[in-house]
Image: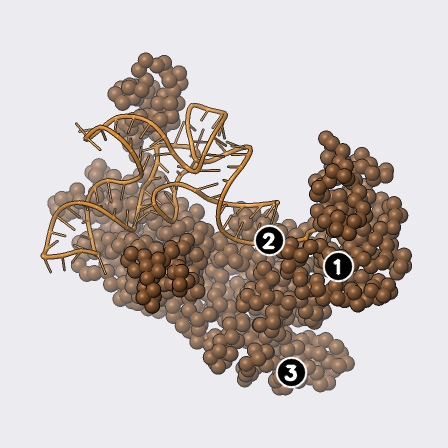
Chain colours: A brown, B orange
Amino acid sequence: MSEYDFSLIEKKWQEIWEKAGVYQSDPDPQKPKYYVLEMFPYPSGKIHMGHVRNYTLGDIIARVKRMKGYNVLHPMGWDAFGLPAENAALKHGIHPAKWTFANIDYMKAQLKKLGFSYDWRREVTTCLPDYYRFEQKFFIEMYEKGLAYRHKTLVNWCPKDQTVLANEQVEDGRCWRCGTEVEMKEMEGWFLRITAYAEELLEDLKKLEGKWPEKVLIMQKNWIGKSVGAEIKFYLPDLGEYLSVFTTRPDTLFGATFVALSPEHEIAKRLAEKKGLASELSQFIQRVRKERRAIEEGLIEKEGLFLDAYAVHPLTQEKIPLFAANFVLLEYGTGAIMSVPAHDQRDFEFAKKYHLPIKVVITPPEKILKVEELESAYTDQGILINSGEFTGLGSEEAKEKITARLEEIGLGQKKVTYRLRDWGVSRQRYWGCPIPMIYCETCGIVPEKIDNLPVLLPLNAKIDQTGKSPLPDLPEFVFTTCPKCGAKACRETDTFDTFMESSWYFLRFASPDPEMPFRKEDVSYYLPVDQYIGGIEHAILHLLYARFFTKVLRDLGYLNFDEPFTRLLTQGMVIKETYKCLVHGWIYPEEVSADGLCVKDNCGQRVEIGKPEKMSKSKCNVVDPDAMINKYGADTVRLFIAFASPPEKDLEWSDHGIEGAYRFLKRIWNLVETYASSLKEVDLKEESLQDLSPHLLKIRRKLHQTIKKVHTDFDERFHFNTGIAAIMEFLNFLQDSLRELTSEDLKDLKTKILLKEVFIKLLLLLSPVCPHLCEELWERLGGRGLIVQANFPSWEEKLLEEEKFILIVQVNGKVRDQIEAPVDLTKEQALELALSSPKVKKFIENRTLKNIVYVPKKLINLVV
RNA sequence: GCGGGAGUGGCGGAAUGGUAGACGCUCCGGACUUAGGAUCCGGUGGGGAUUACCCCGUGAGGGUUCAAGUCCCUCCUCCCGCACCA
């Protein structure tokens, strides 16, 4: 009997599988398809445990579906443009392209070592012109449809990365990538009109209910941020024009005692000009821009600048003052609000500070609200008071009626507003896809001709220490001719946000065609993605953009479906405990002595064990996948990861835990190896498994119960941890049972056939998780063909039925006895059995039996 | 503040309203050994009786039910997301 030599086995089978092309998939209308996709990685250098988890989960699903007869598409690629490549260029003087491709090579080898079942023929690398040329084409088509436009706005600017950031890429006022505080800057850039799809993006979330995590749906919904209300016009006598405000509470209109504008609002600027307040306003603007972050955190009070002007209330004709206020956002609604201090907390605070009138117009039904008693705004709905002819109406009704009145007199209308902003896609970066636009002095903005695509990213550029993009300084890139008039013209030197690439890569996988982005027939066969798997961190950005792209491409005639990802699984993080020394801060586990002291620099301080956190270098709690593969093999790593916790929860890495997984595989290996040679030639005929001895029947029954359980857990629930537990449980049971067999028994053909069935099916069950080990043992057992191409084992429904069961006898709901009984036990028989138990008797004597509840095949409860 | 999720042994985690703690780890004991950090066997929620008996136990408190970790109400704690969005 040989030992479990995982490195030999894994290498052997990886080569055989690759040679045989067992994971290749091509469209086949005769077979049902299943597209399982894991979020492709950024080639950062080497894979981390988060990747291993993500791809292990996807691989198990892919393998199970393959065993279930699906034509499984399971691809992998590289999200290869991005800033880290430029940073590496700066730091190590290596070209971003060289760095990126070296990383891809390395990481690809790592993925191969883990035995993932990818169809590598379909590999997509987004920094290759083969890929990004089509992205340029899509952009031009969007431009021609009015979905892409150039626009000057206040943008989020990261001073360190020297680039613009989308709203989505600003986290807590900091750059999502480098953590530098973000500044506001006015800049021109390209935008995609995602807001045109806001309603559909919101509405279609309903199609994903029950298939995507609820959390993700809610996050998307909030991000889109639909509000229904009214746009209301206030006349400005000073300018002789109207100012529009947006409100969700037109029912509070009579309580409006002032109007507030964003300081950046162009009407604020014009008014200030007229009133001689221009310098005050521009100072105010500068301050607000700078303090924006602090304002949002509530660290700075609400502040305003009185514009020395009044607005006319559309219904009362009252003149109310006009302020530029630091809490009014330019980007939302109309950039101006009607302020109702009695019923909005922000307006309330502002009114208190500037001693503005507060007018109560909504009151709860129980008690009339009085201004003097207000300590904060009353923001609930209620009954209208002090509202002219609308007094007495409920809020909901009043919203309708007041809006209708405004519409009649032409001073307002119903209005829907979204929080979602258009997607700014320009980045002042080098390592990205060039934006295929040209600026011509006579023709203006002209898209590059489709035939001239791709606009190649020049690879001869040098990144210098300023970190700025070298593209504007490359004359051979910048200077070109106008596609329209042929005159000298300049290219756009910005590149696309890398989220552009990840917004359609899943389509390219289905059909990596050199001539077109994808063949329509391939995409309509494979798409949408049946199961998408990735981290929750992409709940908004990537998933929203990909949904948007899908809808745009549908409207451009490329696709015939609305949503790209039918089901979504967001896996939890891989976390590990941390160690903290008072002197050294975070330290490595190796730096902690057995008695819990820090041994770094002989420091000797007590070490605190921190709670588990996401693996990171700075916290010294990273576990390197390579090291684990070398120590235990890919199968063990995969097994531990799948077993340690359910997919959507965080997984705590445990050095002891992986030992346990390794132990389990060695047990399987030793067990199957013990019998392999004697069973290899045995012909597995299921028909000869009738009339088994009770002992063998018990084994067979347990096997079939396990198959069913694993099927449910692996194929329906995606709870791999419990499925694996069931396999472990079966192994424990099997070893106990085998111990009872004599050497005579083992010579019996029937026994041998049964054992062959047991081992063959056991290996099949485990094979999606540990394919290498199972393939090797499958071969040694004389399994037919390759296990990775075998079908999922079936189970016999009638075998699941036991003849006997353990009757739980409860008295008043408490378990008092357990009695073995036949499954067809009637209620009367159960009662008789229960009453005959001395343990039960003890609890019911001297009491009257009031009720008997019998649950067949389970329990009987005697109520006394 | 709003929204979502979670609180179960020493730990990770199991339980269509029906035996709480499957499975794994840890720890303890034993076997085999020159040795074992290998392997195998047994035990391992708490308390008490110590043979096979009882009591308590799923964040806290109520409720529904023959029966509650699971359903309902109130509260507490933790994690995550959003947050001056008018």
Q: Residue at the location (76% across, 67% down)?
A: A282
Task: Evaluate whether label 1 is on the same chain as label 3.
Answer: yes
- The amino acid type found where label 2 is placed reads Gln
Q: CA distance from mark 1 to mark 3?
A: 38 Å
Q: Residue at the location (29% across, 41% down)?
A: A702
- The amino acid type found where label 1 is placed reads Ser
Q: Quadrant of residue A180?
A: bottom right
Query: Up-down: is B40 above or below A308?
Result: above
Q: Quadrant of residue A200?
A: bottom right
The residue marked by circle 1 belongs to what chain?
Answer: A
Q: Residue at the location (66% across, 52% down)?
A: A225
Secondary element at image label 1: loop
Disc 2 to disc 1: CB gap under 8 Å: no
Left or right: residue A518 versus residue A699 is right
Query: Up-down: is A191 above or below A465?
Result: above
Identify residue for label 2: A220
